[in-house]
Amino acid sequence: MKTCIKQIWTFSVIVMAGFMVGCKDDATIGALPEPVDLTMTIANSNLVMGENLDIIFAVTDDKSEISNEDFNIELSLQSADIEKPSILFENFPSQVTFNKGEKTKTVSVPVIKQGISSQHFVTLNAYVRSYKLNNPSQTFTVSDYHYVTVGIKNNSDNTVKEGRNFVLTASIDVPSEEDMVINVSANEEEKSFYEGLPESLTLSKGETTVESEKIQMVSSQDTKEDKVLTLKLSTVSENYPLKSSEIKINRPDLDTSLDPIPVRDERYLYGDPDMMFVSAANEKAVLEWGQDYYEKMEVGDPHPNRGKVLPENTWTFYSAYEFHPISACVKTVTGPMGYTSDRYPRCFADQNTGAIQTAGGCDNSRYGWVTDEGYLRMITLKEGTKINGETNLQGGGKPIGTVMDFGTSAFYACKHKADNNGISSTYEAQNLRIYPGMRIETRARVRGCENTGMLPGIWLQGNEQVNGDPDWNVWPDFGEIDVMENNSTKLPKNVEVTFHIGYQTPGKGDAHNPTTENGVPNFNGKLEEFNIYWVEWANNETVICGINGEETLRLVKSKIPINARWPFDDEVNDQGLYYILSMMFLGGNPPSANKFAGLTTDQVRAKNYDWSNSPVPRMEIDWIRFYVNSTYKDHDKPYRKSTFY
């Protein structure tokens, strides 16, 4: 039942290349030590009893084809599932020697043949004493059997609204060695909710996955409340047991009444908030991704405004980031620790500033990615991560390259610099202008952060901070809008909304910071659900924030203190505002360690990880949409008109 699913991590070791030449009276010293790249590969990331963990080390440096010195590689195992993961193997070695002159070395460690009763995530760490190693770790699973997982395609939440189609999938980590039949059945009283539900799925020999035809969740005017449905699963296979004998499916009902408190219900803005927007340019790719429930949008289309909470005929569609996992919306990026992601969201860049990297390094290639469902998922983990990009030594920050104990995610968009205003094919974060007359909506949820010491947030800041005017480029003189911040210790289930502006004298700090310091009224308990957090830069004298169908905080120029200075003006910030998503650390301090023990990036990215119940602190963004009214203008300053929806 072996396979060859190769996962590769590259790291460097310094191999001594010095040597002595000449006679005993005239010796000369040879070359100094040269860095040699060593690659560690594991041949199978999903192991079961009786199989082997094959670890392959190979020199892969253009300057050297072989090792020119003996060196020892120390190996260790970690797991959050089992105290001593080495007991899963027969004689797991704590050290192996890579010999001088070798190009490759394979270490084969057998998994025990009996005694394993569940699946364990295990991380293999390699270390060479006195040498530099970059990210020498790999996570894999060790189980009693290769389990078959049945779920809903591109839907880790197992949520299907009435009237929607869905597809069941059955998958296994290795090619099946037999034709395998998985029986599917609904409870008798729930059969009427499905149309096209198959009686079984057949996973053919040699295959790793099978999909059903489309199944419809039937609409019904007779139901007025959300339901949780159950599909029963069974199989007669002894070699490939099912991971679970049932699937719970959440069925939101479209006919449920609006919440009487508008701040608690996103349907005041959209009748179907999770319906994606799709451009004509991307429609074909979205269909190939497997989505057929969407709305085609063009510039100028009216805001849905389902609950009539916005002024009629005011806001029209301008642009959106919908986070489709298609080539027009994602790209490949390599981060500071050498990890390469092919799910980095186009239109964004790394917000790797000193303010973000107080207790951990920002590495969006590892800790932020567009999911199969079409979300941008941003996480924080207890994992060594380098500080990269900007730093803030005067503010107590660490130098670039410092390895911190945590890794985190932070992005920005719409950042324009005065010396980089041309239409650029490489600076995708410069893709539109945020000016007065614009409304920005972000549909997001925060999970796993409660009491961790995290501070996930959605912000806007003035672009003048990057444009060199000393009167406006020190925080918070250029202006900051905290559209949403979750102080996970003070307000574990609620959010704050805050404005920050400076004094009349530049560089003197925070002169005025009105906030919902005790949380948004009536919102407590809604944080882990999707909500629409919005901001309107109404004009040069007014900025408004809100959640779902309700305004939460308003800042008006005429009402600020006399010693404060107004930054939300398109003459002060003549490049506009820019947009930030961040998983920050509360007070700049490390989060609560007990919430992160044993979690690694590879573990949370593992195929069978259950994100619906994951303990990992995260913010998930479904979409970001931009609307404008008749007063909006871009001041004839160019921007990259790419289509990201």
Image: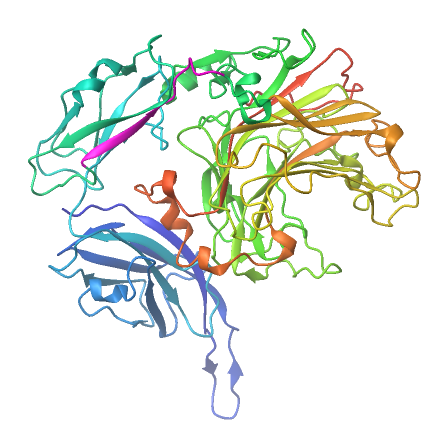
Q: What colouring method underlies this structural image?
A: rainbow
x 73%, y 33%: residue: 416
Q: Is residue 612 visible?
A: yes
Where does residue 384 sit, x and y in percent of width and height? Answer: 49, 59
Q: Is residue 318 above or below residue 417?
A: above
Where does residue 364 sit, x and y in percent of width and height? Answer: 53, 44
x 15%, y 61%: residue: 112
Q: Which residue is at the front of the view, 87 or 117?
A: 117
Numbered range of the magenta stretch:
245-257
x 89%, y 40%: residue: 564
Where does residue 561 sit, x and y in percent of width and height? Answer: 89, 38
Q: Is residue 527 above or below residue 91?
A: above
Query: Which quarter of the figure has residue 462?
Result: top right
Query: Which quarter of the figure has residue 499?
Result: top right
Q: Which residue is at the front of the view, 105 or 616?
A: 616
| The magenta stretch spans residue 255 | yes
Q: Is residue 393 left or right of residue 186?
A: right
Query: Which quarter of the figure has residue 433?
Result: top right
x 49%, y 31%: residue: 330
Q: Which residue is at the front of the view, 96 or 185?
A: 185
Q: Is residue 548 visible?
A: no
Where does residue 195 sit, x and y in percent of width and height? Answer: 24, 12
Q: Which residue is at the front of the view, 481 or 249?
A: 249
| The magenta stretch spans residue 504 | no
